[in-house]
Amino acid sequence: EDVPLDQSLSGISGALLKYLIHNHKRKILRDELMEVFWPGVEPESARNRLNVTLNKIRKTLRLASKLEIILFDADKYFLNQELQIWSDVDQFDNLLAEARRFEEDDKTDQAIKSLEVAANLYQGDFLADDIYEEWTVLTRERLRLAYLDALYQLSRHYFGSQQYAACAALCQSILERDNCREDVHCLLMRCYAHQGQIPLGLRQYQICVQSLHEELGVAPSASTNALYEQLRQREIAEPQ
């Protein structure tokens, strides 16, 4: 109802509310909440802590809305279905699914638009302020990888349409987050080559070699080495 929540919902109460919002499409067993937020605590004590925390959340939510937001039924907690819930995570996943459908239907322009909106929506890792909450780890990593893949797909589209500067910028963004993406190093090398910046392409190969060695203890693939030789001999690779 356009009323911001009290910022006092931090710590365990804030984390529990985030968990309920993130899982708003399903009903959550009380035992699940107890295990996630009070692992190893005796059941009775964990149940009491859960009740106290939920009471605090409900009290705060009542200041923002007359609607009873957190409901309980058959030993499960869930958010009131009358709520209109929008989350960046849901929207991000929907946009990527939409882009895949457009790709399958050979609607490249629409796929690019969906990927661009998704990429702009990603403003940082999932619940970065709750990095020590174990339940956030898998979702954070899934979304991070999905974001990097979206950037890579976009960069390939830009390369295919000869938007080399835009492609290079995305490649650099990916490598800032994962410098072991050999495929991205190669795409960036090709971008530099097509812009007539062969020295930068050769330098990128050296960065690739160093990153793979330091992070993974491996050498570049034969195809990456072959691309390097093409650049070294000024044989600019054709777009793929």
Image (cartoon, helix red, strand yellow):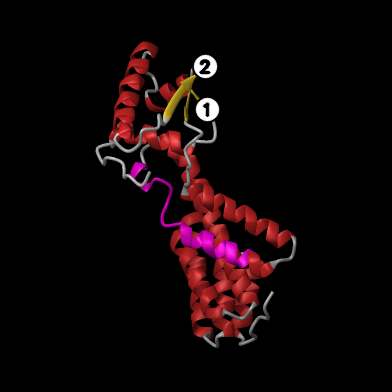
Q: Is residue 71 above or below residue 225?
A: above
Crowdedness near tag 2: few (<14), some (14–19) or many (≥20) residues, C-alpha within 10 Å:
few
Region in magenta: 111-130
Between the C-alphas of marks 1 and 2, the distance is 10 Å
Q: Is residue 220 visible?
A: no
Res 74 label: 2
Give the mark, 1 or 2, whose residue is nearer the N terminus.
1
Kindly identify which residue carries mark 1.
Answer: 27
User: Mark 1 near mark 2, Cβ–Cβ under 8 Å?
Assistant: yes
Q: Residue at x 50, y 19 (%)?
A: 73
Res 60 label: none
Which residue is outermost to the top?
44
Residue nearest the viewer, comparing 238 with 137: 137
Q: Is residue 177 visible?
A: yes
Residue 23 at x, y = what percent? 49, 35
Three-letter amino acid code at the position of disc 1: Lys
Residue 211 at x, y = what percent? 48, 63
Q: Residue at x 55, y 88 (%)?
A: 196
Q: Is residue 29 above or below residue 82?
A: above
Residue 53 at x, y = what percent? 32, 25
Left or right relative to 37: residue 31: right
Crowdedness near tag 1: few (<14), some (14–19) or many (≥20) residues, C-alpha within 10 Å:
some
**What is the secondary structure assignment of the residue under circle 2?**
loop
Which residue is outermost to the right?
105
Three-letter amino acid code at the position of disc 2: Ala
Label total for image: 2
**What is the secondary structure assignment of the residue under circle 1?**
loop
Q: Quadrant of the C terminus?
A: bottom right
